[in-house]
Amino acid sequence: MFSTTTSNLCVNETVWKAGDYMLGPVHPPPRFVITGGTLGIPGPNTIKNWFKIEKYETGRPNSYKLRYCPSQFMCPTCHFDCADVGLYQNKGHAPSGSQ
């Protein structure tokens, strides 16, 4: 789960979660990270907050990717589809501020 304090003066936290926005013909379609997750312990209310950092075989050393794929032990009764976190490109151009 990714969580960061938004300000030293504010007690609110920004919690990342997997968004429901799935675009494109890729199967499974990539997920996108959005804010609005629920801070808390693993379970049905926080299942979209959990990500993995996995080694990415690109032929270049030290390549990793962010993947939404919680472990089943976090919520044995939950159903979820694992997917890579994506970068949306509009007509081949990444959004401003992206790399």
Image: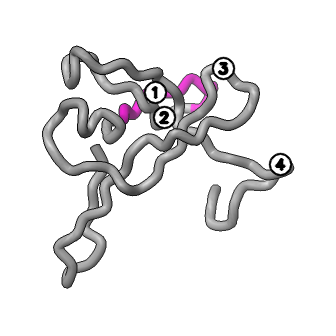
Q: Tag 2: Cα neighbours inside 10 Å, few (<14), some, or many (≥20)?
A: some
Residue for point 68% across, 37% down = 23
Q: Nearer the viewer, residue 49 or 4?
A: 49
Alpha carbon separation for disc pair 4 and 3: 19 Å
- Residue at image mark 4: 92
Q: Marks 4 and 2: which is nearer the front?
A: 4
Kind of residue at badge 1: Lys
Which dot, 2 or 3, sits closer to the camera? 3
Residue 26 in percent (x, y) is at 70, 25
Q: Mark 4–mark 3 contact, CB under 8 Å? A: no
Q: CA distance from mark 1 to mark 2?
A: 4 Å
Q: Amino acid at mark 4?
A: Gly
> Which label was assigned to residue 30?
none
Q: Which residue is mark 1?
A: 55
Q: Residue 43: x percent and y percent?
A: 19, 31
Q: Which mark is residue 64?
A: 2
Specify whether 1 is left or right of 62: left
* Residue 27 - label: 3
Q: Residue at x 61, y 36 (%)?
A: 22
- Part of the protein shown in magenta: 51-60
Mark 1 surroundings: few (<14), some (14-19) or many (≥20) residues within 10 A = few
